[in-house]
Image: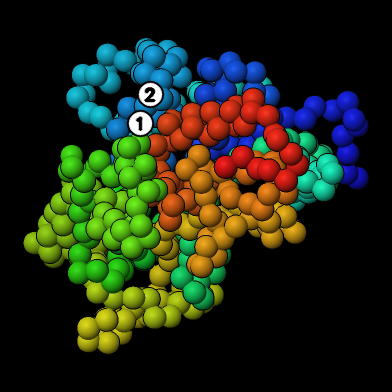
Amino acid sequence: MPEQPPDASPVYDLIGIGFGPSNLALAIAIAEQNDQTDALFLEKQERFGWHRGMLIDDATMQVSFLKDLVTMRNPTSGFSFLSYLHSSNRLMDFINQKSLFPLRVEFHDYLEWAAARVADSVRYQREVIAVDPVTEAGDVTAFDVIARHGADTTTYRARNLVFGLGLEPHLPDGATPSERVWHNRDLLARVEQLTTPPRRVAVVGAGQSAAEVTKFLHDRFPDTEVCGVFSRYGYSPSDDSPFANRVFDPDAVDHFYAAPEHVKEMLLDYHGNTNYSVVDTDLIEELYRRTYQEKVLGTPRLRLFNVSRVAEAVETGDGVRATVESLTTHEKTVLDCDVLVYATGYRPADPLRLLGDLGALCHRDDQDRPVVARDYRVRTDPELRAGLYLQGGTEHTHGISSSLLSTTAVRAGQILRSISDRRAAPLVHSGWSLP
């Protein structure tokens, strides 16, 4: 049965929906700035976790440790990656390895360490299933957030919502996940469930995750044939040169936001190779070295089908029959696989889907994307006075870093400042909404 909060229940200044790195950074900003913001975060997982399925032992981050949860906003923060290293007695060891890029496993441990320090503001195993309006004199002044936990539901009330739902795994049309067909998000858990080593696996995709999965499976199963399938001629290197990396600077968000629409599209097109479907050069060279070595030895176990696609994948009794088609010759190769792994990326979740009829008050552009102000607040009709903020899903307005760690710390500070300023500003009348 739903529990409606009595009148004496708290009305939070903000509720964060989802508790990944973005809303974790916001929780830390609130804790550090001590501006009396009363916040609660709701997370459907039973504990903090971020891409656990890809915590491969030797995989490293593609972003500097300095772009952690806090440093770009507050370099003296006790929640920094360096503070974590110091508390773990590994600071000098990390310095001695002369790298800006920690292991992904280590960075995840840092995130868990930080999440534990703000655990009082989080309710885990709370899946938000709906958001209802709270009205006053015809205006929406707050939201009732309905969260499910087990067989029960609880309603929490807030003046502002901050959506941090993250990304959803993307599969090609017609692909359905199963015990034999995986998205790489579930890689490690799925591998642990295998009772016998696979004879053949195929990995679909050309990006960093696809290359990492290919290498991991090639290492993990020394007698297994590993087939990579991708539409490019070869894995393309990421552009992490200093000037290109400036597209991830906080200042670049200002430039992107103010740019005309055609310039936004141009910038996303120009700099897609800093992030999308690209691979670290060292990993490309390692995979090439392996294919060449196996060719010399006459033991080709790593096979790459370039300029190709999976035309059909049919599950059989004991595996998946994948038909790989060359995009140039249309020649088809049938691969009988034990496992087919799609490393085909993610798509932003639509946070406004939780709003029900409230969504009609949110402004959208001609491509049905939310119209978002510079402070990450969704623009709405005047009668929706309570605030809706997005952490993610703003690439079209704020640029390529919107779904990445690069500007997370700064963005959290900007959202908190916006909420604090709006709380302090007087409302002239019920029909006026702050920009």
Q: Residues within 10 Å of mark 2 (few under 14, many from 20)?
A: many
> Which one is in front, 398 or 219?
398
Residue beneath label 1, please?
A: 67
Task: Pick the residue in front: 316 or 114.
Answer: 114
Mark 1 lies on a secondary structure that is: loop
Would you identify the image quadrant in which residue 57 lies?
Answer: top left
Instruction: Assign a secondary structure to mark 2.
Output: loop
In the visual, does 177 lie left or right of 215? right
What residue is shown at x 49% (from left), y 29% (from top)? 413
Residue nearer the viewer, 383 or 90: 383
For the point 24% across and 42% down, the residue is 245
Q: In which quarter of the image is the N terminus?
A: top right
**Residue at the spot x=20%, y=64% of the render?**
234
Q: Where residue 330 sits: x, y (%)?
A: 27, 87
User: Can residue 373 be spotted in the picture?
Assistant: yes
User: Percent x, y for residue 237?
Assistant: 20, 54
| Residue 199 vertical position relative to residue 24 in the rendered view, above or below | below
